[in-house]
Amino acid sequence: MKQLLNSLDTPSRRQFVERCAATSFGLSILPAAQFVAAELADEKPAAFGKAKSVIWLMLSGGLSHIDSLDPKQGKSKGPAKTINTSADFQVTDFFPKFASIANRVCLIRSMEAKIGVHAPAQYFMRTAFEKRGTILHPNLGAWGAHYLGRSSKTLPSSVCINRRSDQGNGFFPSGYAPLAIGDPNQGINDVKSIGGKSAAKKRLTLLNELDANFRMKFNDKGVNAYNSFYDDALALMKSQELKAFDLSGESQEQREAYGNNSFGQGCLLARRLVGSGVRFVEVKHDGWDHHKALADEMGDVAPVFDQAFATLINDLQRRGMLDSTLVVVATEFGRKPNFDGDGRSHHPVCFSTILAGGGTKAGFVYGKSDDAGYYVDENAVSVGAFHASIALAAGMEIEKPAISPSGRPMTVGDGEEPIMELFA
């Protein structure tokens, strides 16, 4: 009996003991039995795997929550007026187009962090880990590649637009790094020359031949990662799906609807890419660091975001893609409530983010800040829990750790739990 019991895995062993107890003594260990039943049935929350793709919009510089998504009165009030939305919450008049589609978004007003310096805060928001020592941590695109594999046979699983591809694969293989698109209007260089006479193809072939002996002699993970990169690059160049990167396939009316700027065109490119099989796309939007002249600078940068975001949500909805695409609006921190008529300083202990589509509740506000917008008053959301929630929606088995090069088990969100109240 003991030998048989030890041969079973943990759930089976627990189930075996419970059945013996029930049969012999009429006993039932209800909590454990319920746990095993759910585990054996492989039950998952309704939100699990709902988001087949993620579009991550990064507002770089630190969006002022008070002047955008969490307006306040009194001494904290900024230059903007408060307006009603299509949902049961208000925003400022810097975001009139957002107000019209607010009934399709899930607004989080209770984000909190502890890093108030731009570069470390951006790293933290993209990875949910503080940067320490020499280890690099993966973003959600790399975690998706780890848990779910490739999202396309030819297209990359992860792309970043308007920034370099650092803060990407972390300790995972280099093949998990996002493909960087510096200018969405240009797409991938040599995009129209993908046949046998392509100059880029010739260069890659020559480089492959020059490196062949080295790769045969030194067969390690780094070299194998290069081989994989070369194979993927060549396959991508030959693929007809490469046209997903070419915005010339969109009508002029559609391009103007998103906005004739790098962020608007980046959002349009993101929609094209997720529609073609790319799982994770980040679009970066600079210009949100308003220490001075907040009214003027918000007047410049907010309409760019407002137009692109509202158009993206409407476009995804019209194409039947919003339910399967999770749109995330993130920023590294908020801004201080005390407003002197000029600008606001960094404020990580309370700020706002947005989720839309991908199984999240629509027209919903989660969490609350205090009357001044200084601290979280209800339902604090850590950056780790934010990541875990997105990963859950994307169908990642976040309870299964990955092992870092140092041998440390690591999970999405650094062990934080997803917030189930965010999902329908």
Image (cartoon, rainbow, N blue to C red):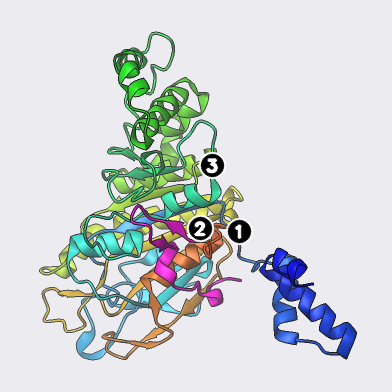
Closer to viewer: mark 3 or mark 2? 3
Q: Position of residue 195 (x, y in %)?
A: 44, 13
Do the residues bearing badges 1 and 2 touch, measured as CB atoms within 8 Å?
A: yes
Foreground residue among 309 and 209: 209
- Decide if residue 14 is on the left or right side of residue 201: right
Residue drawn at x 35%, y 65% as measured from the top left? 128
Total marks in image: 3
Callout 1: SS: loop
Relative to 154, does residue 57 appear above or below in the rendering? below
- Label 3 belongs to which residue? 151
Relative to 221, does residue 193 appear above or below in the rendering? above
Do the residues bearing badges 3 and 1 touch, measured as CB atoms within 8 Å?
A: no
Q: Position of residue 39 (x, y in %)?
A: 70, 69
Callout 3: SS: loop
Magenta residue span = 401-424
Q: Position of residue 104 (x, y in %)?
A: 53, 66
Decide which of tag 1 and tag 2 comes sooner along the chain. 1
Residue 115 disc label = none
